[in-house]
């Protein structure tokens, strides 16, 4: 599913105009981005939790030359799925691929 599919689903369920549904989806995504940029955690019950982890600086290697390279510290977004999402995914997977 891509963003356009999500917008189309909102249109089908709510009966809104496509433009309005697009604005709603964009607003949600932008709100999540802004919260993460400010270092906040975003929790959506039934779906999961978005957050930011800090990776320390470290020494890496250039694969071609083998020379050491200093890799700077950086912030990395992550997603941790909730219990309900895990249950839905596992149930669907086991229904499609039953154990013999």
Image (spheres, helix red, strand yellow):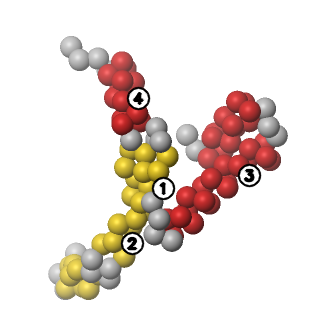
- Closest to the camera, between mark 1 and mark 4, is 1
Q: Residue at x 66, y 44 (%)?
A: 4
For marks 1 and 3 on the same chain, the one whose residue lies earlier in the sequence: 3
Q: Residues within 10 Å of mark 2 (few under 14, many from 20)?
A: few
Do the residues bearing badges 1 and 3 touch, measured as CB atoms within 8 Å?
no
Q: Name the mark on residue 60.
A: none
Q: Residue at x 37, y 20 (%)?
A: 96
> Helix, strand or loop at disc 4?
helix
Relative to 32, is 19 on the left or the right? right
At which x and y percent is residue 10?
Answer: 69, 37
Q: Which residue is mark 3?
A: 23
Q: Residues within 10 Å of mark 4 (few under 14, many from 20)?
A: few
> Helix, strand or loop at disc 3?
helix
Q: Residue 57 falls in which quadrant of the image?
A: bottom left
Q: Residue at x 55, y 58 (%)?
A: 32
Q: CA distance from mark 2 to mark 4?
A: 30 Å
For marks 1 and 4 on the same chain, the one whose residue lies earlier in the sequence: 1
> Helix, strand or loop at disc 1?
strand
Q: Is residue 98 above or below residue 67?
A: above
Q: Which residue is mark 2?
A: 75
Between residues 19 and 41, which one lies in front from this camera angle?
A: 41
Do the residues bearing badges 2 and 4 touch, measured as CB atoms within 8 Å?
no
Between residues 91 and 59, which one lies in front from this camera angle?
A: 91
Q: Quadrant of the C terminus?
A: top left
Q: Is residue 94 above or below residue 100?
A: below
Do the residues bearing badges 3 and 2 touch, measured as CB atoms within 8 Å?
no
Q: Name the mark on residue 42.
A: 1
Let me know if residue 65 appears in the view: no
Q: CA distance from mark 1 to mark 4?
A: 21 Å
For marks 1 and 2 on the same chain, the one whose residue lies earlier in the sequence: 1
């Amino acid at each position: 599913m891509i963003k356009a599919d999500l917008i189309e689903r909102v249109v089908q369920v709510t009966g809104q105009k496509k433009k309005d549904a697009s604005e709603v989806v964009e607003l949600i995504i932008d709100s999540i981005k802004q919260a993460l940029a400010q270092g906040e955690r975003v929790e959506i019950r039934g779906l999961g939790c978005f957050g930011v982890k800090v990776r320390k600086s470290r020494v890496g290697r250039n694969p071609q030359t083998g020379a050491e390279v200093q890799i700077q510290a950086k912030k990395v977004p992550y997603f941790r799925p909730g219990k309900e999402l895990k249950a839905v995914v596992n149930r669907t997977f086991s229904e499609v691929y039953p154990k013999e």
